[in-house]
Amino acid sequence: MSAITLDNITKTYNKGSVLAVDKATFEVAEGETFGLIGPDGAGKTSIFRVLTTLLLPDGGNATVAGLDVVKDYQAIRNCIGYMPGRFSLYQDLTVEENLRFFATIFNTSIEENYALIKDIYVQIEPFKKRRAGKLSGGMKQKLALCCALIHKPVVLFLDEPTTGVDAVSRVEFWDMLKRLKSQGISILVSTPYMDEAALCDRIALIEGGKILSIDSPANTVKKYPGKLYAVKSSNMHLLLQDLRNYEGTHSCFTFGDSMHLSFKQEAEDNISKLTAYLTSKGHQQLEINEIDAGIEDYFIRITEKANG
Amino acid sequence: MRPLRFLLQKEFRQILRSKSLIFTIIFGPIIQLIILPLAANYTVKNINLAVVDHDHSTYSKKLVEKIYSSGYFLRAGYGDSYNAAADLIAHDKADIILEIPQNFEDNLVRENKQQVYLAVNAINGTKAGVGSGYLGAIIADFNNDVRLQWITPQRFTQAPTIDIVNANWYNPYLSYFMFMVPGLMVSLLTGIGAFSASLNIVREKEIGTIEQINVTPIKKWQFIVGKLIPYWFMGMIVFTVGLAVSRFMYGIIPVGNVGLLYGFLSVYLLTLLGVGLLISTFAETQQQAVSVAFFFVIIFNFISGVFTPIDSMPGWGQALAYISPMSHFASVMRMVVLKGSTFHDIQSHFIAIIILGVIFNTWAVINYRKTT
């Protein structure tokens, strides 16, 4: 049985004038960590809210743990954990009170499921008497994860859990998710960070409410058509303009400390022609290397195709 | 029922932890009940009276002394120039001018008839009306004294007169506090009831905690009841505090049954919390909730009869008062506290408040379903 299935889920806002999710279809297998990758406003949160029974879809069917999100919403609420993008615990209750509250309303206790949260909770336990509002961002997020896990959910929904969290905490957080996966919990996680996508079992790229691609991170990047080159020179600003004006260029983007460039047509003499062109434009210390495409490169490539 | 218990536990913990809330609920009413009745006092006193005396006779001085000794008037000026006195009104130093004409005494004695002239600053209508009324009564009284002195008493008075004797029922000394303090308690409870619950629910919306609650097995009614019960208790506490303040500060001891007051209050609070709940379904932020609650509380207050009698309102005002929960509680409060009314006397209010409570709460629950 799949942990989550979506079949042509559609969601609109403002009486149908805003299309947030456009016939989204995917499946998350049991015990899988599935990433929903896309920029802000792509429709990730809408999908989360439909799956967590907070929103009714306008069309399509969806199940969570084999239960229908519309008909069996009460049963779903008993067996899922949801961590919204925004910190949504009681800031005026202490760490311990928040955890105990969420345990009790699920008819369980901290002690009963302590094993599940132990690894995470020990890190915030020294502050258990502190009010949640006074915690640092990273600690708030750990507490939220504990509260979402305390009733031993079958499926865990994490909506942009690492947005606004420092780099070290982000790495720690993904380590925690890995451990949860080993406990057999299925996880649906969304993120705008492409580097985190590589940590999922499978990812769906989403843009403008449409699912553009579903595959493992490794296979996703393999789908990149053609070759990709990293170009560097002494004058990077001018380089971007010149590359974009070059007749053979398909697309060119700034990427870290270099330009990622793809050609319209793959040809043997692409590099030599480009080198000659750039030299004639006065570029020095020119470096052109073929590289493997990343998820972000692929994402940019398919979104520009989708946008015409 | 187990989840409800934990919700209530959480709710009370949060309330007790919020110092500002405790202050507004416990100390707020005490301070307001101490300050407001003194400030919102309709008894007109300290009327500044300027006297323009063109006569300077024994009688004119007697009249002036009689007026000032009544205790309601302050000396704002005494002279023989009307223009100077008019200037005092223009500069807000005098409220009323009393002009005594020349030959006041002579004419009064000789012709048995005299006129005085009153000019009243009517910007503050209440003060002007009540002030000139007092003054008229004092002058009439003075007139009587003079007549008694000058007209030889006869066996039968020449003109038959009707003498009016007043008896003030339920509030024999016309104590302003007896009337106003119970009314202000109603006003305070209405404010707290309409604001606190709606603000609390909207707060959960605003900071997003309702999202987290909605994905738990907690049912809507449990969440709503979990919000209403704590504020229902708060209302009861505020009322008890208010009764204590009015007893020890103003010596007001309800003539009627206090249990009856609590009985009515318990239904009234449910109605009011329904109004708060309704507001919370319309508002997304606490700021919106405050604006809407403020709108209703102001209307409730002004048509409640606490400050102005409902009977003197126009027809639509009276109709509005009838569908406003606060006016029913205000009537019941005064009836029971001052008059000792029994359940039988107030049952029409009871029925009205129950109907209003059912309407507001049903509306709120229906609307709550729709919005989420």
Image: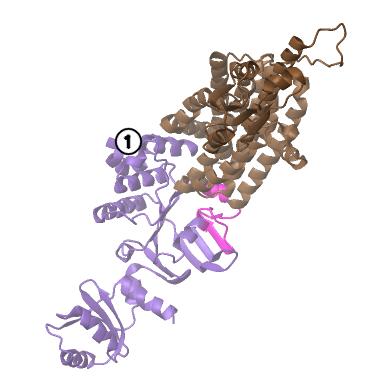
Q: In terms of image quadrants, where is residue A193?
A: bottom left
User: Dot 1: within a 10 Å radius of its alpha carbon, few (fewer than 14), some, or many (20 or more) residues?
Assistant: some
Relative vertical location of residue B277 with respect to residue A227 in this rendering, above or below: above
Q: Position of residue A240 (x, y in %)?
A: 25, 81
Task: Say what secondary structure mark 1 lies in.
Answer: loop
Q: Is residue A27 left or right of residue B46?
A: left
Residue B1 visible, this angle: no
Chain letter corresponding to the colour purple: A
Amino acid type assigned to the residue bearing label 1 in the image: Arg
Q: Is residue A296 left or right of residue B219?
A: left
Relative vertical location of residue B361 with respect to residue A72 in this rendering, above or below: above
Closest to the observer, A93 or B77:
B77
Magenta highlight on residue A270: no
Q: In terms of image quadrants, where is residue B299?
A: top right
Q: Is residue B344 left or right of residue B96?
A: right
Q: Position of residue B271 (x, y in %)?
A: 65, 34
Magenta highlight on residue A77: yes
Q: In terms of image quadrants, where is residue B140?
A: top right
The residue positioned 49% from the left and 25% from the top of the image is B31
* Residue assigned mark 1: A130
The residue positioned 70% from the left and 17% from the top of the image is B142
Q: Position of residue B268 (x, y in %)?
A: 65, 30
Q: Chain of mark 1?
A: A
Total numbered labels:
1
Q: Is residue A68 left or right of residue B106?
A: left
Stretch of the chain drawn in magenta: A50-78
Closest to the observer, A90 or B351:
B351
Q: Position of residue A102 (x, y in %)?
A: 45, 39
Q: Colour of chain B?
A: brown
